[in-house]
């Protein structure tokens, strides 16, 4: 063994060829560095499960809201030659109701953009009118 003096302190080096500098060198900690590509990959790895979770939460909440209401009962009528939307709405409206409101509701319910009807067409009527 040999004795080496550095900065006023005495250090011992072994006979195996180890130098005094190697024996006293502090261990360096490696810091993780992400490149731009690595950050994108990491972001995608985090975003995909988060999106699936949010999608499942959205489906669950929609199903809970849709399941909480009682389904509306619809009555279907077949359009005959000479029938108009006004005549069908007037027949479906109570005495206290407005035929125009019923017409609008029938158009919205069936996805109609005009009041034109075709003979043989099935029209859904709301049951509460």
Image (cartoon, rainbow, N blue to C red):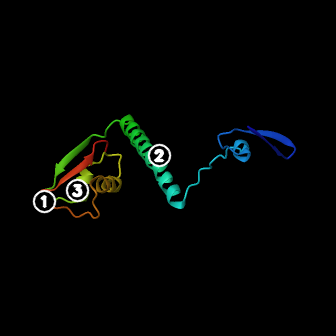
Image quarter where the C terminus lies is: top left
Q: Are marks 2 and 1 in contact (CB under 8 Å)?
A: no
Q: Tell me which numbered mark, 2 or 1, is placed earlier along the sequence.
A: 2
Question: At which x and y percent is residue 121?
Answer: 16, 56
Q: Are marks 3 and 2 in contact (CB under 8 Å)?
A: no
Q: Are marks 1 and 3 in contact (CB under 8 Å)?
A: no
Q: Residue at x 43, y 49 (%)?
A: 48
Q: Residue at x 26, y 58 (%)?
A: 86
C-alpha span from label 2 to label 1 = 51 Å
Q: Is 57 or 9 nearer to us in this picture?
A: 9
Question: At which x and y percent is residue 120?
Answer: 12, 56
Image quarter where the N terminus lies is: top right
Q: Based on the displayed image, in which of its 4 quarters is residue 69 positioned?
A: top left
For the residues carrying marks 3 and 2, which lies nearer the camera in this image?
2
C-alpha span from label 1 to label 3 = 14 Å
* Secondary element at image label 2: helix
C-alpha span from label 3 to label 2 = 53 Å
Q: Tell me which numbered mark, 1 or 3, is placed earlier along the sequence.
A: 3
Q: Is 125 or 42 nearer to us in this picture?
A: 42
Question: Circle 2 sits on which residue?
Answer: 50
Give above or below for 118 relative to 60: below
Question: At which x and y percent is residue 59?
Answer: 39, 42
* Secondary element at image label 3: helix
For the residues carrying marks 2 and 1, which lies nearer the camera in this image?
2
Q: Based on the displayed image, in which of its 4 quarters is residue 33 positioned?
A: bottom right
Q: Is residue 36 left or right of residue 121?
A: right
Q: Based on the displayed image, in which of its 4 quarters is residue 101 positioned?
A: bottom left
Question: Circle 1 sits on which residue?
Answer: 119
Question: Circle 3 sits on which residue?
Answer: 87
């Amino acid at each position: 063994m040999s004795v080496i003096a550095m900065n006023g302190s005495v250090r011992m080096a072994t006979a195996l060829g180890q130098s005094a500098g190697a024996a006293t060198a502090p261990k360096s900690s490696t810091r993780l560095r992400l490149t731009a590509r690595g950050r994108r990959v990491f972001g995608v790895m985090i975003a995909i499960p988060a999106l699936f979770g949010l999608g499942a939460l959205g489906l669950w909440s929609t199903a809970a809201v849709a399941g909480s209401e009682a389904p509306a009962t619809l009555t279907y009528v077949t359009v005959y030659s000479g029938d108009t939307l006004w005549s069908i709405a007037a027949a479906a409206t109570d005495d206290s109701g407005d035929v125009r409101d019923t017409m609008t509701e029938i158009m919205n319910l069936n996805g109609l953009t005009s009041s034109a009807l075709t003979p043989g067409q099935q029209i859904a009527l709301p049951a509460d009118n």
